[in-house]
Image (cartoon, helix red, strand yellow):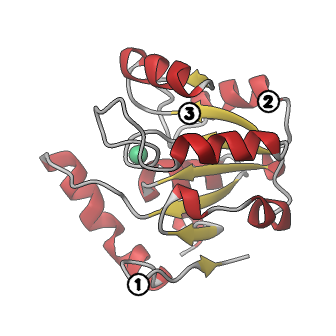
Amino acid sequence: MGILSPTVAMQKVTDITPELLRRMNIDAVLLDVDNTLAPPTEKKPYEGVVEWIEEMRKEGFAIVICSNNFNSRIKPFSDSVGLDCVAMSLKPFPFGFNRAKKKLKEKPKNVVVIGDQIYTDILGANLAGMKSILLVPQSEEHGLSIKIRRSMEKNVRKKLKILKRGENYVDK
Ligand SMILES: [Mg+2]
């Protein structure tokens, strides 16, 4: 699968532990928002997300939000959970990741991108030399473009064998 393959795949963001990130040699985290931390367009994060962010920061991980969505959506959300953000990041292109990396002052190999989309979050992480964790999208989705992207993801997800069975896949 190569360039479309995440380092790790899990069900949801709150399944990710400080121990896992340490095993992956991670110091900093770039977090997607929609379908990763909160339902698309909703202000309220998924259950346990605020506590998870708090725990990760206490454990010493630097966290920046990196989303392709507009600033008007991402900035208020990031403020509400107390995180710095890069909106309109144009994932999978490197522009947004580079802006986030400057904020973090980290080497790419010590950064993990966490998100729910293979063709933005995971492809972007691989192109930037960063590690990645692919999640299962947590909310129902509407609209043609996301349905096309999800159907393109199907084969990769099948190979990862995570779909709905709660198994976690570790590639490297
Ligand atoms: Mg997303």
Q: Does any portion of residue 117 appear in the rendered image?
A: yes
Q: Earlier in the sequence, mark 3 or mark 1?
A: 3
Q: Residue 149 placed where, x, y %? A: 28, 56
The alpha-carbon separation of the residues under discs 1 and 2 comes to 35 Å
Q: Quadrant of residue 117?
A: bottom left
Q: 96 or 35, which is in the foreground?
A: 35
Callout 1: CB less than 8 Å from ligand 1:
no
Numbered tag placed on residue 165 in the rendering: 1
Which residue does the image show at 52% across and 65% down from the upper left? 4
Q: Is residue 21 left or right of residue 166?
A: right
Name the kind of residue labelled 3 in the image. Answer: Cys
Q: 83 or 48, which is in the foreground?
A: 48
Q: Residue 62 placed where, x, y %? A: 77, 36
The alpha-carbon separation of the residues under discs 2 and 3 comes to 12 Å
Vertical comparison of 123 with 33: above or below: below
Numbered tag placed on residue 66 in the rendering: 3
Q: Residue 70 placed where, x, y %? A: 38, 21
Q: Does any portion of residue 61 appear in the rendered image?
A: no
- Neighbourhood count class around disc 2 (C-alpha, 10 Å): few under 14, some 14–19, many 20 upward: some
Vertical comparison of 159 with 108: above or below: below
- Neighbourhood count class around disc 3 (C-alpha, 10 Å): few under 14, some 14–19, many 20 upward: many
Name the kind of residue labelled 1 in the image. Answer: Arg
Q: Earlier in the sequence, mark 2 or mark 3?
A: 3
Which residue does the image show at 36% across and 58% down from the upper left? 137
Q: Quadrant of residue 54?
A: top right
Vertical comparison of 155 with 47: above or below: below
Q: Earlier in the sequence, mark 1 or mark 2?
A: 2
**Can you identify the residue that label 2 sits on?**
104
Q: Quadrant of residue 50?
A: top right
The alpha-carbon separation of the residues under discs 3 and 1 comes to 28 Å
